[in-house]
Image (cartoon, grey):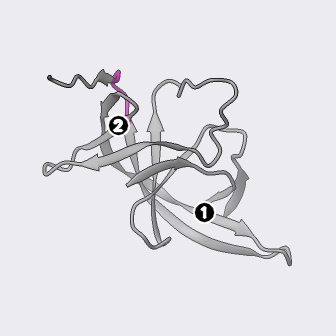
């Protein structure tokens, strides 16, 4: 799966909240838009000031046979865990006629709390 940043409105429990100013990373799990995940990072994603993160490719997510997610960002790897959300999020887009369309339902999040480990290639 590819991890990229998105912006928009997210609804939880019947209320809409604009989280465009909050650091949120959405994950497209399948080729269809019906199953997405939320990636929670401890810390910040450091990049040059000239790079905008909106819509940018951040890294690649892999899930091993044991079900442990691993996030590869540049030359670093992070190990995490999958947690089911207490209340699902709805990802919505606003149409030109000011109506809202549900784009996806987010039911789980991928939590990465540990420090990244460098990927070292053997020669």
Residue 54, percent from left and from top: 65, 44
The residue located at (69%, 60%) in the rendering is 15
Question: Dot 1: within a 10 Å radius of its alpha carbon, few (fewer than 14), some, or many (20 or more) residues?
Answer: many
What stretch of residues is rendered in magenta? 112-116
Question: Dot 2: within a 10 Å radius of its alpha carbon, few (fewer than 14), some, or many (20 or more) residues?
Answer: many
Q: CA distance from mark 2 to mark 1?
A: 25 Å
The residue located at (61%, 51%) in the rendering is 6
- The one of 27 and 42 positioned closer to us in this rendering: 27
The residue located at (42%, 70%) in the rendering is 31
Return the disc, 2 or 1, that comes first in the chain's sequence.
2
Above or below: residue 17 compared with residue 71: below
Secondary element at image label 2: strand
Q: In the rendered image, which quarter is residue 21 located in?
A: top right
Pointer 2 residue: 72
> Relative to residue 29, is residue 122 drawn left or right?
left
Q: In the rendered image, which quarter is residue 70 located in?
A: top left
Marks 2 and 1 close (CB-CB < 8 Å): no
> Relative to residue 58, is residue 12 drawn left or right?
right
Secondary element at image label 1: strand
Residue 82, percent from left and from top: 31, 47
Magenta stretch: dominant SS?
loop
Reply yes or no: does residue 15 show up in magenta: no
Residue 55, percent from left and from top: 61, 49
Residue 83, percent from left and from top: 34, 48
Above or below: residue 116 compared with residue 23: above
Above or below: residue 63 compared with residue 35: above
Pointer 1 residue: 91
- In the rendered image, the quadrant that contains the N terminus is bottom left
- The one of 86 and 50 positioned closer to us in this rendering: 50
Reply yes or no: does residue 115 show up in magenta: yes
Q: From the viewer's perspective, is the residue at label 2 or at label 1 nearer?
A: 2
């Amino acid at each position: 799966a590819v991890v990229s940043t998105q912006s928009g409105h997210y609804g939880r429990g019947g209320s809409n909240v604009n989280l465009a100013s909050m650091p949120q990373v959405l994950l497209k799990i399948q080729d269809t838009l019906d199953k997405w995940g939320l990636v929670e990072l401890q810390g910040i994603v450091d990049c040059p000031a000239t790079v905008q993160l909106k819509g940018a490719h951040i890294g690649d997510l892999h899930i091993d046979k044991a079900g442990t997610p691993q996030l590869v960002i540049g030359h670093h790897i992070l190990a995490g865990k999958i947690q089911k959300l207490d209340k699902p999020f709805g990802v919505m887009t606003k149409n030109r006629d000011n109506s809202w369309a549900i784009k996806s339902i987010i039911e789980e999040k991928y939590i990465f709390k540990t420090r990244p480990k460098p990927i070292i290639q053997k020669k």
